[in-house]
């Protein structure tokens, strides 16, 4: 009989036995088990769980949706080893018992008390594949490559078969068993089995209440998903409610809301796109289709910052049904106490403190207003100027962007080819190693760019909500200082000193040589622009004396700007803002505006 004809209704039918193989702890199989049991309504359901844990399991099931942990001691030579067994709602065995009790079926715990479950490979293909290929093909693909079988595995399967063979001979039985034990159990059922040897009766089995903060470490499926499953199992018509990518998207968005509330910062769309790409790559590295919660936290920390990584982990750990207070003993467990080969993730939160830290006596405290409105009364508004130390920083970063943009474009124009008669611009080690099996050396030839980068346009926010209403153009004060046009928040709404305002850039343009720029914001030549960022780009193309104009933003400019640039003999070098350091960009976004040149002498006492 072929596997295709053998698999029916997601299970394998052999006489009066319907075997339903599962991957333990995975929500897709919990859904499949519940659907199958509600459809078939068998009289007897056998589950692959130890008989000595039956009493504790039933007590744990009575506590659901609140999770529990079973603790017992396992003999290991001279020392005893503590074994923790989490009871999760999204586990297929837990669901099998819950649904069996719901439909009034008898439950048989198959695993013998005489010996421990042998160690078998638990590496299953990503169960998200079931949503695309179905459970039948998933099981079929797994069984194509049989797992290694030892004497302990055969003895364990024989003990389970003995218990099955001793059940009511007139009643069909549904057997929920792990995929890696399915074939040994099927083979053992072909022969009558003897009763296994009696083992030590354990009396040290305890039921514990896991602390809500440790659930994500000790469960197979993260608590946020298990909470979704608890609502889903009551009404299973909306299958999209448990779609893994959709649940992950909801998790990240809810974590983003918490992140904005705690830090005041927002995620950009390019950061969301990079998180999606990063998690996809992490999943592929682990031979999975969808990233796990650890990968989500790593991506959030790496692409945004530690604060967002913390919010993602906390949101994944959310399980509202779990309480710290309980009639059971509450324990806070770590992943290392439950699993082997665990991974560690270090997250350091950096949030504003409501209370200042104690400071050494040598540090001068920041000046404060003696009374509200004192600094506002000292602001004249007759003129504005910049703060020179900030000018030096932003000019240096402008030179860095020019070099980076040229390097990126040059890298795109590199040609790699097998070595023949000349090494050209040098050996390409990466391509040579990648094609080492071909026994060839690869060399590279880089086309040099003719021309330099002139104007630099940096867009932090395209300002579709019209948040940045302060529009300014100011001229360089010396030959090494650029003319600059920018839009920002209104600086004098946030005074940090008398006549010293603090603002946040939305975007800016810098161009050399200085003292040439007319007011960009009132220039009618740029009325074609549809946004502030486009107006700055048009001015950059107009005022640049070099061939290339660097444009840094979350997305490239509209295609028509390529034509405009070509018409004036310029070329736009686009640099994705995600390719730059977020920490550096965060510092650059702050700008201080002084209401007179005299303020520069005292500004250092107020600016931090």
Image (cartoon, rainbow, N blue to C red):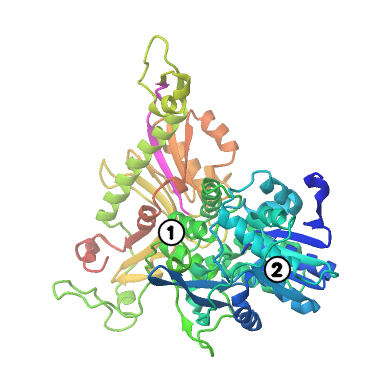
Report if residue 122 is visible in the image. no
Farthest residue to the right: give it: 170
Is the residue 524 above or below the residue 368 in the image?
above
Asked if residue 449 lies in the magenta stretch, the reply is: yes
Relative placement, left or right, of 416 versus 122 is left
User: Badge 2 is on which residue?
Assistant: 163
In terms of depth relative to the viewer, which is nearer, 257 or 464? Answer: 257
Q: Which residues are magenta?
A: 444-460
Q: Is residue 415 magenta?
A: no
Q: Residues within 10 Å of mark 1 (few under 14, many from 20)?
A: few
**Residue lying furthest left in this view?**
362
Residue at numbered disc 1: 343
* Residue 343 visible in the picture: yes
**Kind of element beneath mark 2:** helix
Q: Residues within 10 Å of mark 2 (few under 14, many from 20)?
A: some
- Report, in whole angstroms, how far the alpha carbon at label 1 lies from the one at label 2: 38 Å
Q: How many marks?
A: 2
Q: Position of residue 565 (x, y in %)?
A: 52, 33
Residue at the outermost bottom position: 327
Name which quarter of the figure residue 556 lies in: top right
Q: Which mark identifies residue 544? A: none
The image quarter in which residue 380 lies: bottom left
Residue 593 falls in image quadrant: bottom left
Q: Give the residue displayed 80% in from the left and 77% down from the top.
A: 103
Give the left or right position of residue 352, taking residue 138 as reference: left
Q: Nearer the viewer, mark 1 or mark 2?
A: 2
If you read the primary sequence from the N terminus, does the residue marked by circle 1 or circle 2 appear first?
Answer: 2
- Percent position (x, y) of residue 12? 78, 55
Q: Residue 3 in the image: x percent, y percent?
A: 78, 46
């Amino acid at each position: 009989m072929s596997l295709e004809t053998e698999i029916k209704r997601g299970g394998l039918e052999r006489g009066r036995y319907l075997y339903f193989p599962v991957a333990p702890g995975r929500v897709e199989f919990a859904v499949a088990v519940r659907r199958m049991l509600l459809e078939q309504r068998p009289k007897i359901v056998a589950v692959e769980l130890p008989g000595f844990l039956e009493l504790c399991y039933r007590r744990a099931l009575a506590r659901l949706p609140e999770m529990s942990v079973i603790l017992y001691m396992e003999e290991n030579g001279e020392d005893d080893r503590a074994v923790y067994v989490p009871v999760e709602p999204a586990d297929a065995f837990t669901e099998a018992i819950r649904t069996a009790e719901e439909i009034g079926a008898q439950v048989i715990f198959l695993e013998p008390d005489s010996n421990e479950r042998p160690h078998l490979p638990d590496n299953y293909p990503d169960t998200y594949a079931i949503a695309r290929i179905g459970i039948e093909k998933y099981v079929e693909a797994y069984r194509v490559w049989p797992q290694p079988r030892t004497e302990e595995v055969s003895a364990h399967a024989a003990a389970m078969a003995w218990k099955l063979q001793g059940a009511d001979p007139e009643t069909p039985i549904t057997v929920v068993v792990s995929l890696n034990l399915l074939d040994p159990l099927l083979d053992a059922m072909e022969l009558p089995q003897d009763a296994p040897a009696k083992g030590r009766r354990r009396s040290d089995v305890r039921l514990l209440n896991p602390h809500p903060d440790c659930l994500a470490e000790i469960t197979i499926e993260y608590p946020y998903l298990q909470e979704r499953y608890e609502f889903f199992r009551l009404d299973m018509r909306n299958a999209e409610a448990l779609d893994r990518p959709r649940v992950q998207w909801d998790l990240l968005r809810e974590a983003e809301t918490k992140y904005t509330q705690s830090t005041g910062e927002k995620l950009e769309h390019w950061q969301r796109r990079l998180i999606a790409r990063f998690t996809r790559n992490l999943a592929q590295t682990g031979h999975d289709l969808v990233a796990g919660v650890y990968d989500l936290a790593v991506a959030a920390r790496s692409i945004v910052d530690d604060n967002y990584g913390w919010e993602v982990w906390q949101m994944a750990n959310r399980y509202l049904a779990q309480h710290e207070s309980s009639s059971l003993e509450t324990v806070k467990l770590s992943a290392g106490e439950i699993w082997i080969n665990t991974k560690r993730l270090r997250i350091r939160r950096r949030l504003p403190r409501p209370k200042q830290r104690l400071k050494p006596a040598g540090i001068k405290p920041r000046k404060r207003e003696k009374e509200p409105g004192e600094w506002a009364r000292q602001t004249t508004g007759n003129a504005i100027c910049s703060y020179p130390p900030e000018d030096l920083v932003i000019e240096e970063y402008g030179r860095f962007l020019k070099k980076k943009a040229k390097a990126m474009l040059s890298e795109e124009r590199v040609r790699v080819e097998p070595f023949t008669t000349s090494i050209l611009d040098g050996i390409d080690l990466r391509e040579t190693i990648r094609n080492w099996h071909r026994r060839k050396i690869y060399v590279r030839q880089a086309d040099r760019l003719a021309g330099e980068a002139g104007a630099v346009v940096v867009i932090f926010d395209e300002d579709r909500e019209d948040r940045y209403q302060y529009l300014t153009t100011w001229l360089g004060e010396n030959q090494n200082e650029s003319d600059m046009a920018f839009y920002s928040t209104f600086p004098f709404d946030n005074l940090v000193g008398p006549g010293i305002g603090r603002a946040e850039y939305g975007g800016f343009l810098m161009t050399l040589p200085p003292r040439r720029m007319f007011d960009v914001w009132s220039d009618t030549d740029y009325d074609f622009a549809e946004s502030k960022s486009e107006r700055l780009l048009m001015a950059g193309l107009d005022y640049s004396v070099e061939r290339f104009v660097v444009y840094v933003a979350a997305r490239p400019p509209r295609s028509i700007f390529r034509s405009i640039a070509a018409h004036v003999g310029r070329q736009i070098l686009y640099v994705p803002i995600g390719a730059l350091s977020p920490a550096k960009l965060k510092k650059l976004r702050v700008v201080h505006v002084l209401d007179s040149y005299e303020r520069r002498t005292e500004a250092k006492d107020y600016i931090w």
